[in-house]
Amino acid sequence: MIALITSSLSRSAGGIYDAVRFLAQSMKRKPLVLGLKDSFTEIDAHGWGNIEVRSYKKIKFSLFGYSPLLWSDLKQMNIDLLHLHGIWMYPQLVSLRWKLKYNKPVVISPHGMLDAWALKNSSIKKKIIRKLFADKSFLTVDCIHALCYSEYKSIRKLGINKPIAIIPNGINIPEKFVKVDKPLGSKKTLLFIGRIHPKKGIELLIDALNGLKMKDSTFLKNWNVEIIGWDQENHLEELKIKCSKYNLQSNIRFVGPLFGEDKKTKLKSVDAFILPSYSEGLPMSVLEAWSYRLPVLMTKECNLPEGFKTNSAIELKLDSEHISLMLEKINKLNDSELIKIGDSGFKLVSKKFTWEKVAIDMEATYNWLLTKKNKPDFIKIN
């Protein structure tokens, strides 16, 4: 049996929640999923479909999700391979203990958490966890899963010399849909979806909009910006204060989190998507935007260079003035030009980023680790 283990089984994990559940649902050999319980676990339980999921309560006030029942339960299971999604939390220690006890294959998917920016964030906590168990975990793991070549290079820079499987995230292509009609003459909408977290660069977007306001650009007359997501580290309040300072409340709308049909309806009704992020593994939100034929504005730190090569995205630099210039650029594009960019994105995800393809590659990785035969070409030994 294959088991996937993660620190959260709900929306609290951000894109990792979708990555783990859609991988599990797309695999031919359905895995068991184990994870820590949080305030959204029961609400989001339906999202796992027919996958067997076991959740474990954390000890109160534990900074890294200590759950003794998770380890005691795992020892009783007949698991052939363990795949850890996300690091720095108690499940990483559990995967290490399991590896040392049974010497069976372990795969780790850091999901961008070993990138330089991510390592600098909460760096003291991560340095402590590395000394306690994380570094040993990386030394004993059988294979690491990188979402892209950039993440592969980041892992190698840390001196980790284990085999690395380069497999992207995927997306479920929506069935044929019709865009939501807007009233004639209404403004276009630029959308952000994700965690409201400092690494997402939303403050750069707000600064860019203020720059356009100061220049009396027509962008704010033609576009609104909607920020969708849940707050982390009280960053939402900081952004609202900045909007108030710049008097942009009528131009920027903080919607809160949307899920399920509400999110799908929103994606059908907007005109473009933006992610000015400082650091990503491989963002599910961009793949989702492309699956709804939306033109995308994003930084190279989103690790989707294919988007720029296929004219499916406009590149943003981590600079508010440059973002202002790119916003003015999309403001000058007519509807057919925006649609053309979005169509390119749809073709890209349909060809390269489906969960069916991701699951085939991941199961090939598992089979190689279990049998020591038929190493896939996307696994880098050096």
Image (spheres, helix red, strand yellow):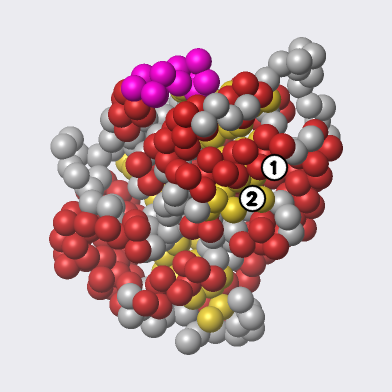
**Closest to the observer: 119 or 184?**
184
**Closest to the observer: 185 or 117?**
185
Disc 1 packing (10 Å; few <14; some 14–19; many ≥20): many
Query: Quick one: label 2 or label 1, which is nearer the N terminus?
Result: 1
Callout 2 touching callout 1 (CB < 8 Å):
yes
Q: Amino acid at mark 1?
A: Pro
Q: Which residue is mark 1?
A: 295
Question: Which marked residue is nearer to the observer: mark 2 or mark 1?
Answer: 2
Considering every residue shown, the one lying at the far top of the view is 183
**Observer able to see residue 55:** no
Residue 93, relative to residue 274: is it above or below?
below
Label at residue 314: 2
> Element type at marker 1?
loop
At which x and y percent is residue 332? 72, 37
**Observer able to see residue 2:** yes
At which x and y percent is residue 212? 52, 32
Residue 316 painted magenta: no
| Quadrant assignment, res 59 | top left
Residue 355, relative to residue 251: is it above or below?
below
Q: Which residue is drawn at the image coordinates 79% and 14% (left, top)?
A: 184
Label at residue 138: none
Q: Which residue is drawn at the image coordinates 59% and 58% (left, top)?
A: 304
Q: Amino acid at mark 2?
A: Ile
At which x and y percent is residue 347? 79, 52
Residue 249 painted magenta: yes
The range drawn in magenta is 243-253
At which x and y percent is residue 203? 39, 37
Q: Which residue is drawn at the image coordinates 25% and 39% (left, top)?
A: 58
Considering every residue shown, the one lying at the far front of the view is 215
